């Protein structure tokens, strides 16, 4: 009991020491100023407004109208800037990528959970259920405010027996490390007898000397590809289904386009994507309408900078607010409306590009991040999303579910999960195969896939 009582006292004392040691905000260089933002309290800054902050992140108009394209927050002495326009995000994170490509080191998600091995969270100086579980752990732990130690890093100095968060996250690290290394060792053993499939682990092991990575680092590089693809792709596809339930006319347009290219005799393949601009437009609009990483993956500045009169100190955390960025009225008229035609109709001058055999596409789309920290596998994600959407439309009908009296059930428009990746919570809908002919094609494809060489 004495130890249990000592734990919160130790946390309080360390927190007070941390707050007391934080330097006061510096005066901006002559001719510059800090960006506007909600007023904070002494020492803790906007920490008590964390829930308010998350609400602000989800509203383009509130952020842009009240504070402008850059909003300043301070959380226990750390500067946080929220960027709400694509221009500012690109100007800083892409054009000045040499000083805005680092990551703030949140102790829980970047240090304790992966033991500094997860590439996406490293500073710039560097199966399936288990994969999903690991990914959910990362999303939960990386969510702002999930662990007090991320706000007060001094808590890392607590000995392990006084820090329950250390014991919890260390156990999660043991599980994901065991998973990632287990996948690697399994392929290594199968390479010895010539049964290893073509996969990322095999490619890494065959070229390890060129990559100059240890087994642990290589296992995490490959494992991160799995977890990133599983979490973000599934979240995007759930939003796609929601959009199609709410906008059945667009789903019918997708079906008509896919049928015109593939007929009922075969599924869509990657080679068909060039002829499917409506499919591509629907996916791109889904990602604009409901960005997966709504609050963006934060960057960090490595030295002082001044941008259009705004002072950005070194070690400032920059949040590219995807929700707001994709709702700029100047770029996206009627931003709250789901309008795939904005990518297909030349009257939409800020978004339409030709030829439609190439555009729309997701190349360098802000959904995948900015600058030097843009998602390195965005091309894989792009192909997956197009193919999944096309095959769902080819194979099935999607519609609203009905209650016991035959009335349609409207799914909630904005009932989304909180956390790193945003996805709609469970909602009812109907999914039915379009015909027995198409079902036979699906069964044949499944049979052919089972007989072919497995992919990791």
Image: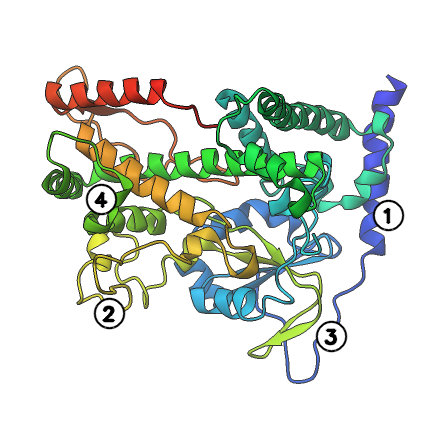
Task: Examine the rendering and report whether any part of residue 414 can be seen.
Answer: no
What residue is shown with label 1?
A: 17
State the image quarter where residue 73 is shown: bottom right
Of 416 and 172, the residue lying toward us: 172
Name the secondary structure under disc 4: helix
Check the image and report above or below for 292 versus 339: above
Location of residue 153 in the rendering, given as x and y in whole percent from the top left corner: 77, 45
Q: Nearer the viewer, mark 2 or mark 3?
A: 2
* Residue at 70% over, 46% down: 212
What separation in Å lies between label 2 and label 1 (alpha carbons)? 55 Å
Q: Residue 103: which numbered mark, if any?
A: none
Looking at marks 4 and 2 on the same chain, the residue that comes earlier in the sequence is marked by 4
Residue that appears at 53% across and 24% down? 196
Callout 3 crowding tier (Cα within 10 Å): few <14, some 14–19, many ≥20? few
Residue marked by disc 4: 272
What is the quadrant of residue 349 in the picture? bottom left
In the displayed structure, does residue 130 sit left or right of residue 409?
Answer: right
Disc 2: which residue: 349
- Looking at the image, how many numbered discs can be counted on the residues? 4
Secondary-structure class at tag 1: helix
Q: CA distance from mark 1 to mark 4?
A: 61 Å
Identify which residue is drawn at 67% across, 37% down. 147
Q: Residue at x 22, y 44 (%)?
A: 272
Element marked by disc 3: loop
The residue tagged 3 is 27
* Mark toward the start of the polypeptide (2 vs 1): 1
Mark pair 3, 1: CA separation:
24 Å
């Amino acid at each position: 009991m004495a130890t249990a009582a000592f734990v919160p006292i130790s946390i309080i004392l360390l927190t007070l020491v941390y707050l007391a040691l934080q330097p006061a905000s510096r005066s901006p260089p002559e001719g510059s100023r800090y960006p506007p933002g909600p007023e904070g309290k002494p020492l803790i800054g906007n920490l008590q407004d964390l829930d308010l902050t998350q609400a602000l992140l989800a509203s383009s108009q509130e952020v842009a109208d009240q504070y402008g394209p850059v909003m300043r927050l301070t959380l226990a002495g750390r500067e946080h800037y929220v960027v709400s326009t694509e221009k500012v995000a690109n100007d800083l994170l892409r054009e000045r990528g040499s000083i805005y490509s680092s990551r703030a080191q949140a102790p829980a998600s970047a240090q304790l959970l992966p033991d500094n091995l997860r590439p996406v969270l490293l500073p710039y100086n560097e199966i399936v259920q288990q994969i999903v579980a690991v990914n959910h752990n990362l999303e939960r732990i990386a969510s702002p405010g999930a662990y007090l130690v991320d706000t007060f890093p001094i808590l890392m100095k607590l000995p392990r027996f006084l820090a329950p968060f250390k014991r919890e996250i260390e156990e999660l690290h043991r599980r994901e490390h065991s998973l990632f290394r287990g996948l690697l060792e399994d392929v290594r053993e199968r390479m010895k007898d010539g049964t290893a499939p073509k996969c990322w682990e095999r490619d890494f092991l065959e070229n390890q000397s060129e990559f100059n990575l240890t087994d642990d680092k290589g296992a995490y590089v490959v494992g991160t590809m799995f977890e990133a693809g599983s979490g973000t792709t599934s979240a995007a596809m759930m939003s796609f289904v929601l959009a199609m339930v709410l906008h059945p006319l667009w789903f019918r347009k997708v079906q008509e386009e896919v049928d015109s290219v593939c007929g009922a005799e075969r599924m869509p393949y990657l080679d068909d994507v060039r002829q499917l601009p409506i499919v591509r437009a629907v996916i791109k609009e889904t990602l604009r309408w409901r960005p997966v990483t709504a609050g963006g993956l934060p960057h960090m500045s490595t030295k002082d900078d001044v941008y259009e009169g705004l002072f950005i100190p070194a070690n400032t955390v920059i949040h590219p607010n995807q929700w707001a960025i994709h709702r700029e009225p100047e770029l996206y008229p009627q931003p709250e409306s789901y309008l795939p035609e904005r990518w297909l109709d030349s009257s939409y001058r800020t978004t339409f590009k030709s030829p439609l055999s190439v555009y729309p596409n997701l190349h360098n789309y802000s959904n995948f991040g900015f600058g030097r920290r843009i998602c390195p596998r965005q091309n894989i994600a792009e192909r997956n999303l197009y193919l999944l959407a096309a095959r769902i439309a080819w194979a099935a009908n999607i519609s609203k579910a009905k209650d016991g009296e035959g009335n349609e059930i409207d799914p909630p428009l904005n009932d989304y999960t909180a956390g790193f990746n945003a996805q709609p919570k469970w909602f009812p809908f109907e999914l039915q195969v379009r015909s027995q002919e198409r079902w036979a094609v699906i069964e044949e494809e499944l049979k052919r896939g089972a007989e072919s060489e497995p992919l990791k």
